[in-house]
Amino acid sequence: MLFEYAVIGGILLGIFYALLAVGLNVVYGAQKIINLAHGDIIMLGGYGAWELYNTYHISPILSTIIVIPITVLFGYLLNRLIAPRLVKASDPEMLSLILFFGLSEVIQALASLVFGSAERSLPVSSIPTSRLVLFGQGYPATWWVSALVIIPLLAIFVIFLYRTSIGLQVRAVISDSVEAAVAGINSKRVSGIYFGIGFALAACAGVWGVFIFGGVSPTEGAAITITAFAIIVFGSLGNTLGTIAAGIIFGIFYQLAQVYIPSWSNLVPYALVIATMLIRPQGLFGRRQRIA
Amino acid sequence: MRKKTFPVIAASFGIALAACGSSSTSSSSSGSSGTSASNLPAAPAQITVGTTYSGSGSFATSSLPELAGLKFWIKTENAKGGVYVGGYKKRIPLKLIAYNDLSSATTAATLYNQLLTQDKVNIFVSDFGSVLTAPAVSLAQAHKVVLFDQTGTGIPFFTPQNKYIVLTDLPESSIWPNVLAKFLISKQIKNLAVLYGTNDFDASQATTLKSILSQNGINVAYYQGVPSSTTSYGTLLQTISASKPDAVLEFGYAANDTPFLQNVQSSGMHFKMVFTVFPGQLLSLFQQQVGTAGLAYTYTYGTNFYVNYPTVSEGLNSSQFKTQFAAAFPGQLNSLSLDGYNTGLVIQASLKNAKSLSQTDIRAGAAAASGHLNTLNGNFVINSEGAQTGELLPVAQLFPSSSGITLKAVYPASQATGSAVYPAPVG
Amino acid sequence: MPKLDDLDLTLETGSKGKKLISPAIAALVPIVAFAVGVHLYSNELLLTYMAIYIALAQGINIIYGFTGYLPFGYFGFFGVGAYASGLVMLDYNVPPVLAVIIGGVAGALVGAILLPLFRLRGAYFAIGTLAASEAIYTIISNPSLQSITNGPYGLNLAGFYSSGTAYGTAIALAALSILATSFVRSSKFGLTLKAIRDDSYSASMAGVNVPRQRFYAWLIAAAIAGMAGSVFGWSTSVFYPQAVFDPALSVLAIVFALFGGVGTIWGPTIGTVVLYAIYNAIGVSNPQYFQLIYGMVIVLLVLFAPRGLAGFWNYITTKITTVRAKND
């Protein structure tokens, strides 16, 4: 009975973790940029939802959509600012790591100044409150409501990537920016937009993070970034569907660990990463040649 | 190449050792004891108080009000011409030096050393909590300067060898649950669930509670540590409710207690008693985050902020402090600002008893105050290791009221301002 | 003591044949500076930490600067060293200086265990080491291991505290790490590593055992971090597990090394001294925007000086040479 609860609860939470990680993967896919500020964008999404609810009484469900255009624009502009300089470097991937660490510090500092250091949370009553009852067991509203909002969001993103012409251009740029340029694709703009989408997905996850993490605070970013990294490495870098599956599996493992080995439960993401790397270094859904 | 590196290494070690030889002598400060009144050095123009605080980062919420409390004490004393020093029979003005450690223990360590070696402060005060206090402990010991440890309740700090630490505002963490355990026994609760964060502060409380309860034949059916980073308790609560406990006790940091209480509410479970650590210290924050429904009838440690002490032997009494502090530092009044102010009162009492401003005399002054000092934070008692054994925290319950949530101490009877409602009403 | 003149320590680089500043000077200058510095500025702990960061930055230099593998979880070795040395001091009363060496050995052992991570490259490797270090932290701080590691309660080494000796050891460690870098850089071993970085395919074709050489560099870097952690634990003396297993340690060491310029002997040393001094100067003067300023400094550095101070130096010297050549 506890096993079933952990599995179903794990799937519901796992959908949230999939969204939490997918934005990081998108940013990496665009230009091999390692976004150490990923968790901080999630944090900003959380504050966005808080402000929208407390100032304009906007439901977090609606906020999930409102934050998208703002963060796409922010991400796009940031990308156009930094990408040209990164590309010139001898090791852009590693340099981006340092750059985004600095950016993460800046965002954290600004967030503390603007929002104060105390944790903020949204009332449970800001979203539907009835529990989901499945097989005689009740699951908290925050779990299923977040899953219900996130599933269509992820579906739209996947359709965009695999079924639209912009999505095709994006994938062309990811696989080979030189060839894409030859084919007449403006790779700078396309990767800029895709980068912005990565930020937007992170911000959407942030809205629901307020509920799943019990609040939002300026310093939460770094720990979230590490978890997100664990999930995308597990699902293999650059692979969107892999990340989504990895997020759900992570959710299940994490909940099972809470039932059977609670004090070791935060080993789950690291154990997943290490096991993946030793057994299948290219990740769950990766092709071998991507890595070595 | 290899042959030629060795002489260089040898030379390096030579110079390095020379450096340590000379520097270790230069770093030792004078801590001569028992200065008699006759050959007392001239009174200094001012007494410097040195501390660090977290201007940002995870401890800022607690550290900033604590610093405000200390500042308030300094302001109050300076308005009277300074703090009274017994040995000199006069008041000497206070000066505060406070550095921002950004919630980092490493940064705090270098700043503590800055206070000791560069600023040579007379009164050395650590930042909030055990994590940031830890690096100050051995520095204080090595420089023979008394550490006024405000809220760093960690067990490893207090050892028979260390004569340079005084815990001012809270009991050592392992004795926090003493009153709580007695309350549980008095309510004849037979079956318990304990969930604790795997950190020094929470694990020591859980250990103490479990051992007292098992001595009294009370069964702890569920006893589990979870990582301090845990924020999702749905599945854990499901496991806990399977053990059908009469009381659920969660020892965590504020960032654990909030989601725990939220999860209890959203899971729709009902327990006869739910206890968490931090609502009593940060009540208004919890009220914003968890709401009245989520907090109603839960229990917490009732800090002395919620207990009224009309007669005190030092400083302001409870109601005077609340009025005057709120006017001086708007929006920062909470149990931690009271702690910061109380740190000042302990320093004040120690200096009043001190024969001189030497650190040994200040420490002796604190020992003399132990047991006799009554403040708005209760009775100050320290053991020979400097650990606080007084100022015990009563058990409190949170009641819904017209203004939201009201905290009332319910146990022990001597401090009670209300009576416990057990089991908690459904809905 | 041998006179500097007696030692012929000038070395040739393989690539350009340009004369390099002697590694002995690279190691001796910081030693003398630190030995004198403590008499001018008596915050010995701050200087101890600075020496520890020099060692860490040099460790990053050895593994990243010469092989291109960036260990984001470098702090894991640091924490292991702090615990290994602290525990042998407490349990077996081992003298601190010997315990520091044991800490280095423990770091190297963990490095050997983590060797399979070299199957990964780039970001995968960076994140893999991070995960491994977080896992080690979780294990060491777990209450189930309280009887061995004292679990979440941390260690109290106050009985072994001796700021002077710890300071001397920290300086010696910084010097040792600089010598290790110069050894790696100028030996055949270092040239091999450079070949690995530039083109591992042709290096392996030329009969160089790439993985073995990389393994040695990895072990040296891990041992340095282990010793650095030992000195840190000893000089801080009361610490919780989260203070020695702090990802910020890796990040700062990486930033310091990159700022100075990786692949050079002087770069990481100067980078650490300059940035750590700025960090503390801002901290002590205590402006409201500490974190903001520090973050912006890093962002601007990456954008405008991606090759660090060493790159900047090269740029200037190249300019001067070109101008001279024109004038001639």
Image (cartoon, coloured by chain):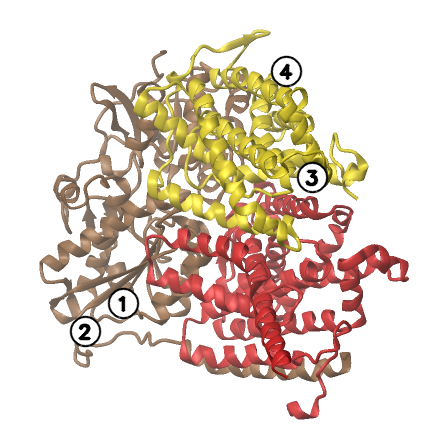
Q: Image quarter for residue A125? A: top left
What secondary structure is marked by label 4?
helix
Q: Label 4, on which residue?
A: A4
Q: Position of residue B35 (x, y in %)?
A: 24, 76
Chain letter, red: C
Chain coloured brown in the rendered structure = B
User: Which kind of residue does numbered mark 3 sit on?
Assistant: Ser
Colour given to chain A in the rendered image: yellow
Amino acid of disc 2: Pro
Q: Which residue is mark 3?
A: A177
- Label 2: which residue? B44
- Write the residue at 39% across / 41% down: A111
User: Which amino acid type is marked by label 4?
Assistant: Glu
- Do the CB atoms of the residues marked 1 and 3 lie less than 8 Å apart? no
**Residue type (three-letter) at the residue carrying disc 1:** Asn
In whole angstroms, how far apart are the C-alphas of marks 1 and 3?
65 Å
Q: In percent of the image, x 69 and y 44: which residue is there? A: C124
| Percent coordinates x, y for residue A167 in the rendering | 64, 26
Q: Secondary structure at mark 2?
A: loop
